[in-house]
Image (cartoon, rainbow, N blue to C red):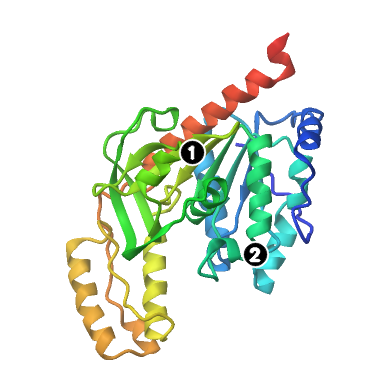
Amino acid sequence: MTVLLEKRRLIVSPGLVPAQQRREDKLGHPKNVDADLTIGLINNMPDSALKATERQFMRLLRQAAGDVRIDFHCFSLASVSRSQSAKGRIDGQYTDIAELDRLPIDGLIITGAEPHTANLNDEAYWRDLTDIIDWAKENTHSTIWSCLAAHAAVLYLDGIERKPLETKCSGVYDCASVSPHWLTDGLPSPFKVAHSRLNELRADELTANGYQLLSQLPRGGVNSFAKDFGSQFIFFQGHPEYEALSLEREYLRDIARFLAGERDRYPGIPVGYFDTGTELRLTAFALRAQNERRPALIAELPERTLREDIAMGAAATVMFRNWIGFLSARARAVSPEANL
């Protein structure tokens, strides 16, 4: 897979131009002669997960691409708050998001940003994100919305509000396909996907607004869904891109925040993730942590072993292979050569 990370220049806003002009400009841009597809990742994840998110999606695309050559660009919204070190990485290695109109983007992947307000539409990045949503409808063949980005997108597109969960949905869950769709072709049923979220979108509200449910968790929670906006929008409430240790890092971070007094509740053990012995040790440690709450206790966490059957990334490779196939078919259908 061809990978290109261009230098990104700091900008104040996406600087998106009207849809009609964008459409005309895009048709005028020649394809990269060395690539079959151009795919962008708008990486809005917190600083601590910035590099990991790049790595996870590049790994997925490499595994899924086969013989397809991909010109890959990372972007980030300038309105997402960043540390100086993260800004340095973005300035040095990311493409300026204003370049979206120059590049012949076939597909986008958009991740969520850590929320700082109770309502997503009060976030500092909200206007920039909604500009991207409108842009993606007109200028991509398909866009993937990951976790919090999925919640933000359906709020803007159809006014669907996410609902808080009683306890965090965290773990590796068996998901079952619920309707035929090109994205899930070839997946076993059930298949495993990682989830890590405090809120959910309800199935009945999604279907009432024309979304197609693609897969669900055992107790009915939505895993993935889709809707055609001219561009095929694909939404994941979970994290199919997560690597084996991603949930462990989040769990340890939440424990550290509890011990430091930055969160009120001790985090639950991720479901279906650690082996039985580890779960017993972590349960005993949780009782101790709640009685001896102090930051230094994090150093005494017990040894941890993951279950052997979590199969991280297996389902994601199939879905991203299907996504790349869809993008390739759409790109061929609209290319000038296809009409000769």
Q: Residues within 10 Å of mark 1 (few under 14, many from 20)?
A: some
Q: Is residue 278 above or below residue 70?
A: below
Type of the residue with mark 2? Val
Q: Amino acid at mark 1?
A: Gln
| Residue depicted at x 67% and y 71% | 85
Mark-to-mark CA distance, 1 and 2: 30 Å
In the picture of the structure, the residue carrying the numbered disc 2 is 80
Query: Residue 269 location in percent, x, y?
Result: 27, 67
Q: Is residue 262 left or right of residue 136?
A: left
Q: Nearer the viewer, residue 204 or 70?
A: 204
Q: Quadrant of the C terminus?
A: top right
Residue count near mark 2 (Cα–Cα under 10 Å), binned few <14, some 14–19, many ≥20: some
Which image quarter is the N terminus in? top right
Q: Which residue is mark 1?
A: 63
Where residue 331 sits, quadrant-wise, is: top right
Q: Quadrant of residue 318?
A: top left
Identify the image quadrant of residue 288.
bottom left
Residue 198: x, y in percent? 39, 63
Image position, residue 181 (x, y; %):
41, 28
Q: Residue at x 36, y 90 (%)?
A: 294
Helix, strand or loop at mark 2:
loop
Q: Earlier in the sequence, mark 1 or mark 2?
A: 1
Asked if residue 247 shows in the view, the reply is yes
Q: Position of residue 99 (x, y in %)?
A: 77, 46
Q: Is residue 133 left or right of residue 225?
A: right
User: Which one is nearer the viewer's eye here, 216 or 251?
Assistant: 216
